[in-house]
Image (cartoon, helix red, strand yellow):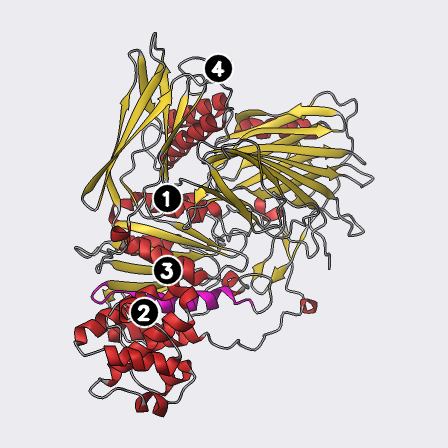
């Protein structure tokens, strides 16, 4: 089989992607990403190639150019269909042409068509995009450069789809990456999943710094960067000057302001947890969930990790709430016809079914499962919380996000992207449209701590009654570009964009007052800003604001209505004037300076797609998996466009890949202990519990203090063991322990001697206060 990624010759030799160079320009909470991809056609005939690559969710492409030898060709942004027609005409006539377009199904997938690359020619592709940096649970700003694009599963009844791409077992190219950070806040540190050179500060205030990826990095996994600021919860207002050549009064011609709002939740609020709610867990059971979490030794299968996580979630729920569990693939099923009250009986029934969950439900179709959930009536005083687990192989992302958004007032959505290549558009989009929180589990990350963090968010109060008031000089008005924000939850950050219109004859300063309520306590923040920035701050904030407006207009268009054509016209006009990609536009570049045209049919190429288990591993960098369009022939002077299904072939799993079933690893003692806890929060004194502690049941019974109930003794021992032996995993068992402590307090038995004897038996030094009893 072919062990290379991308285009292959008749001798199974690759059309090389020689190198990838990426430069990041971080400005506060936004980033501009410039990527250069170098290719060489080492064939003796002309090639046409299609490169399918991922971008982060809601990234907006704002520049595309190609350099052929010494000739630089800068692409123009045009209506997508006219750009396609121009590309087809150019390639049909033997001219070099380049077409960059967003997938109709998902905003995180782009397709680059390269037409008529002559023999021996060197092509350097330059792509620039802007995006907001997502916020993580530990307050870091996260940037991820994807090395993997999962295929989007397409139902057989649908003609649409995103082409699958293949992966290299040995990545044949290297990556260079440099980062330049400028911020209004002091930079604390910058970490990465890959080796970095030391961080270099360029000013005394530590607001400007640079760092680079260590030389020689092989782009065989996602590159994750985590940026930490010192005052992460401090609101900020940053103004970017308008573009001098743009029309005054237009979005690009006027100053644009970006407000960052990331409320801090005090300790008393963090400890205030709701005891009511309806919790619906939606688990991807498609074949791709049978892949490993990562490529390391002893890595769990994704479905196994999901089962362990469901165990922790079910044991952590408060008594009296409602819950249900859904599995989805080509179809969906639920454990109960509708959500049921959480009790010992319903919890045990659910756990039995969780143990038997397999990745055996075929493809990935989440839409119908969500429609069924939303059709169920909500329970009064029990707000609905969805927890969605998927590796992101969903083809109709935009339709799913529209459905989540249309039901935002009846639920919150917490989403979890599992494994390399999970669709950022889907994962972050569901959390954004559902007013929840998104988490990604990549590399050697464990799923459980991230999920339990989100459960804490789901049980805590939210920031609401958010308002934004402006104080600006006479002659200046403010046009809000972002949609209203109804609520913010622990771990969420909002970026608000506004356009400053008009001119002031006098004052050059303004102020914005942001008010909100947190647990019935009003909070007010007033931020000062200048109307006329003195330095050239670039166009990142303008482009992010344009992207924000475009996404809202696209969603409004998909919802349908009488003004669909007017919305399309507005999208086209703003996309072209701002130079920011949209679903209706594409970048087109034609090399009109070439002195020769290509004659004869283009070389035909098909790319084998390797499958591992029931999923594919896909390559490519930024990306990077390249596929050649098969020779289409000519039809009345026009080339027929290849359908997505024609862009790649599927190959069966190869036996020589040697993925044999390995012995099951030993069960985690923490999960063993949690599995023994009752729904009310207590443990029973038995052999299974003694095994977790490495003791016999007789040892536990013989050390039990007189007059202390066996269940109380067992529960105290369980808490001591958690604090003593698994203190580093407290985020995972915090709710299990809270339930246990509450149950012990309700028993009203003398506990001082019990805790003392328990510490002696298990070798601990835990106090009653630490145990919460």
Main SS, magenta region, reads: helix
Residue at numbered disc 2: 315
Q: Nearer the viewer, mark 3 or mark 4?
A: 3
Horizontally, is 224 left or right of 124 in the view? left
Other residues around mark 1 within 10 Å, as few (<14) / some (14–19) / many (≥20): many
Q: Earlier in the sequence, mark 3 or mark 4?
A: 4
Q: Nearer the viewer, mark 1 or mark 3?
A: 3
Q: Earlier in the sequence, mark 2 or mark 3?
A: 2
- Magenta residues, as a range? 299-321
Q: Residue furthest top?
A: 505
Residue at numbered disc 3: 452
- Dot 1 falls on a residue whose secondary structure is helix
Residue at numbered disc 4: 246
Residue 420 forms part of the magenta stretch: no
- To which quarter of the image does residue 717 belong? bottom left
Q: Earlier in the sequence, mark 4 or mark 1?
A: 4
Instruction: Please say if 332 is above or below 181.
Output: below
Q: Name the one closer to the observer, 648 or 573.
A: 573
Image position, residue 751 (x, y; %) = 23, 77
Q: CA distance from mark 1 to mark 3?
A: 19 Å
Residue 309 forms part of the magenta stretch: yes
Other residues around mark 2 within 10 Å, as few (<14) / some (14–19) / many (≥20): many
């Amino acid at each position: 089989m072919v062990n290379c990624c991308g285009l292959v010759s008749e001798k199974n030799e690759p059309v090389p992607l020689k190198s990838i160079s990426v430069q990041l320009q971080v400005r506060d909470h936004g980033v501009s990403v410039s990527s250069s991809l170098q290719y060489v056609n080492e064939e003796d005939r002309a090639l046409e190639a299609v490169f399918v690559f991922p971008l982060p969710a809601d990234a907006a492409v704002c520049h595309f150019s190609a350099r052929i030898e010494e000739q630089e060709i800068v692409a123009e942004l045009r209506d997508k269909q006219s750009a396609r027609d121009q590309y087809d005409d150019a390639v049909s006539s033997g001219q070099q042409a380049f077409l960059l377009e967003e997938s109709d199904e998902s905003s995180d997938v782009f397709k680059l068509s390269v037409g008529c690359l002559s023999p021996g020619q060197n092509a350097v592709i330059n792509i620039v995009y802007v995006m907001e940096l997502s916020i993580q649970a530990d307050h870091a700003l996260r940037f991820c450069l994807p090395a993997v694009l999962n295929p989007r599963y397409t139902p057989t009844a649908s003609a649409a789809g995103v082409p699958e791409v293949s992966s290299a077992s040995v990545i044949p190219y290297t990556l260079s990456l440099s980062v330049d950070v400028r911020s209004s806040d002091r930079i604390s540190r910058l970490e990465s999943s890959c080796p970095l050179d030391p961080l270099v500060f360029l000013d005394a205030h530590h607001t400007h710094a640079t760092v680079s990826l260590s030389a020689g990095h092989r782009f065989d996994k996602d590159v994750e960067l985590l940026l930490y600021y010192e005052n992460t919860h401090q609101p900020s207002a940053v103004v970017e000057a308008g573009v001098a050549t743009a029309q005054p009064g237009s979005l690009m011609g006027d100053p644009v302001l970006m407000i960052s709002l990331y409320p801090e939740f005090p300790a008393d609020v963090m400890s205030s947890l709701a005891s009511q709610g309806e919790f619906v867990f939606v688990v991807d059971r498609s074949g791709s969930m049978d892949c490993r979490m990562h490529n390391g030794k002893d890595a769990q299968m994704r479905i196994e990790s999901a089962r362990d996580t469901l165990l922790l979630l079910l044991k952590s729920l408060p008594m009296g709430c409602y819950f249900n569990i859904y599995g989805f693939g080509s179809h969906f099923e639920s454990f109960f016809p509708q959500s049921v009250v959480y009790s010992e009986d319903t919890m045990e029934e659910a756990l039995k079914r969780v143990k038997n969950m397999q990745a055996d439900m075929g493809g990935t179709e989440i839409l119908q499962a969500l429609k069924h959930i939303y059709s169920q009536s909500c329970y009064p005083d029990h707000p609905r919380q969805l927890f969605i687990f998927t590796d992101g192989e969903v083809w109709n992302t935009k339709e799913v996000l529209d459905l989540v958004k249309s039901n935002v007032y009846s639920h919150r959505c917490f989403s979890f992207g599992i494994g390399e290549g999970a669709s950022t558009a889907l994962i972050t989009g569901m959390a954004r449209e559902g007013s929840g929180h998104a988490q990604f589990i990549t590399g050697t990350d464990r799923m459980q701590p991230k999920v339990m963090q989100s459960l804490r968010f789901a049980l805590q109060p939210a920031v609401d009654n958010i308002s934004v008031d402006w104080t600006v000089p006479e002659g200046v008005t403010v046009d809000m570009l972002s949609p209203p924000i109804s609520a913010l939850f622990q771990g969420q950050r909002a970026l608000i964009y506004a356009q400053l219109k008009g001119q002031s004859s006098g004052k050059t300063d303004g102020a914005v007052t942001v008010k909100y309520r947190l647990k019935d306590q009003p909070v007010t923040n007033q931020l000062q800003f200048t109307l006329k920035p003195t330095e050239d701050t670039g166009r990142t904030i303008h482009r992010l604001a344009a992207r924000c407006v475009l996404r809202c207009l696209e969603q409004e268009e998909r919802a349908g209505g009488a003004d669909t054509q007017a919305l399309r016209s507005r999208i086209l006009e703003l996309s072209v004037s701002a130079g920011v990609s949209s679903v209706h536009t594409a970048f087109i570049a034609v090399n009109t300076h070439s002195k020769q045209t290509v004659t004869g049919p283009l070389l035909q190429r098909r790319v084998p797609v390797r499958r591992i288990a029931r999923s594919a591993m896909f390559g490519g960098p930024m990306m990077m998996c390249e596929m050649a369009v098969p020779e289409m022939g000519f039809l009345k002077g026009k080339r027929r466009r290849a359908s997505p299904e024609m862009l790649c072939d599927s190959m069966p799993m190869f036996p020589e890949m040697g993925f044999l079933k390995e012995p099951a690893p030993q069960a985690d003692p923490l999960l063993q202990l949690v599995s023994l806890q009752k729904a009310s929060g207590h443990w029973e004194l038995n052999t299974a519990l003694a095994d977790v502690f490495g003791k016999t049941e007789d040892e536990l019974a013989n050390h039990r203090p007189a007059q202390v109930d066996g269940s109380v003794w067992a529960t105290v021992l369980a808490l001591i063991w958690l604090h003593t032996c698994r203190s580093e995993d407290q985020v995972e068992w915090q709710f299990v322990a809270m339930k246990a402590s509450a149950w012990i307090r309700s028993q009203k038995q003398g506990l001082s001697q019990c805790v003392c004897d328990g510490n002696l038996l298990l070798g601990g030094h835990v106090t009653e206060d630490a145990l919460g009893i």
